[in-house]
Amino acid sequence: MATKSRHQPDVIARIGNWDNFLAAITIVVIVYAIFEVPNFATTFNISQAVAGISERALIALPMVLLIIAREIDLSVGSTLALTSVVFGLLVQAGIPLYLAIALTLVAGAACGAFNGVLVTALGLPSLVVTLGTMALFRGIGYILLGSGSINDFPESFLDFGIDSVGNTPVPWTVLPFIALAPLFAIALQKMPIGRRIYAIGGSPQAARYSGIGLSRTIFGLFVTSGVVCAAAGMVYAARLANARANNALGIELDVITIALLGGISVFGGKGKLTGVLWALLLFATIRNVLGLLQIGGDAQGTVIGLLLIVSLLVSNAAERIFATVRAQYFQPKAGE
């Protein structure tokens, strides 16, 4: 009897959590779309829906780590746009493709390092810093390219943006995310860097007193965000066959919505990538369904904004409900 009582809370803790709740909602929405939304289940539409989430999925990875560490990067969309412009200019100048890719990643790292220095060395809030660099980086993109665009890319690069893997509906543009997601998950859940990130988000002062290098860790997270945004910028350029300074306007709202919907606490120190993966799938499905129903971009933005607010309210309420149920009905009784 005692063994049963001890195991019951563990089972409920595994089942009664936000990740599983979000998974159930996502499955319900997908099933509804398959049977009720015309053309949703076609191979072409699935491929387009997955391709459309490629950049957001990539950027969500470092964003999750930053939010867990009580930081944020609002400049991700501008970094994406600027690095896509840098990449386009390098290709236009005749730089070999692989060298252009490497230099673009370096440019992304420089953007992230700039944010990191302002936050760690000068002690400025990341919200204010990245709000400023959100305008700064995009402005640099306009200085470099103006209001025009670059559309002339190597054929192999454009094939990467439009082709799928073999006969599957999986587009090549989602492969960078598929490659990086396990690495980020392992780093966050299984490695010392992950424990440091959670410790910083849980209590920066306690983390500092325990010997964790806060500045070094946070600086590294911003550099990582810049590099991943540069990769997303090249994916974006390949998928749409253009590089311009106004690429990916508003993508930061989508990425933050995905992270918070996935159960990442806005107060830091809490969350896992498992929930974020379900949030990505739900987000992609909702976006795709709205498009198939011919609901325009402005209305879609309204839905995403509401989804952000609802995710904050519902996730907090759900966690309290799960905790109350476990405490009242599944705690071992005295003497058991």
Image (cartoon, rainbow, N blue to C red):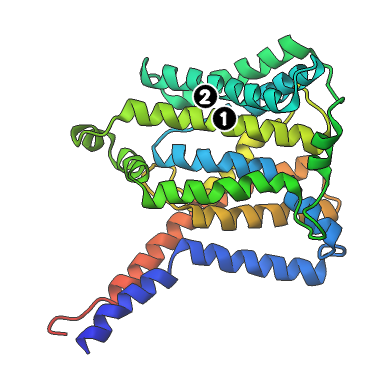
Residue 290 in sight here: no
Q: Quadrant of residue 162?
A: top right
Gap between marks 1 and 2 measured at Cα? 7 Å
Task: From the top left corner, tell me how far across and down residue 166 is, in percent.
Answer: 80, 56
Q: Residues within 10 Å of mark 1 (few under 14, many from 20)?
A: many
Secondary structure state at the residue bearing disc 2 = helix
Decide which of 15, 330 is in the foreground and name it: 15
Q: Residue at x 84, y 29 (%)?
A: 154
Q: Is residue 109 above or below residue 29?
A: above
Q: Quadrant of residue 54?
A: top right
Q: Residue at x 54, y 19 (%)?
A: 110
Disc 1 residue type? Val
Work out which residue is located at the far top of the displayed protein and give it. Answer: 143
Task: From the top left corner, tell me how far across and down residue 153 is, in percent.
Answer: 84, 27
Q: Is residue 315 above or below residue 214?
A: below
Decide which of 289, 84 is in the foreground and name it: 84
Secondary structure state at the residue bearing disc 1 = helix
Task: From the top left corner, tell me how far across and down residue 136 is, in percent.
Answer: 61, 15
- Left or right: residue 285 versus residue 120 is right
Check if mark 1's residue and mark 2's residue have beta carbons within 8 Å. Answer: yes
Decide which of 303, 77 is in the foreground and name it: 77
- Left or right: residue 87 versus residue 114 is right
Q: Residue at x 75, y 55 (%)?
A: 170
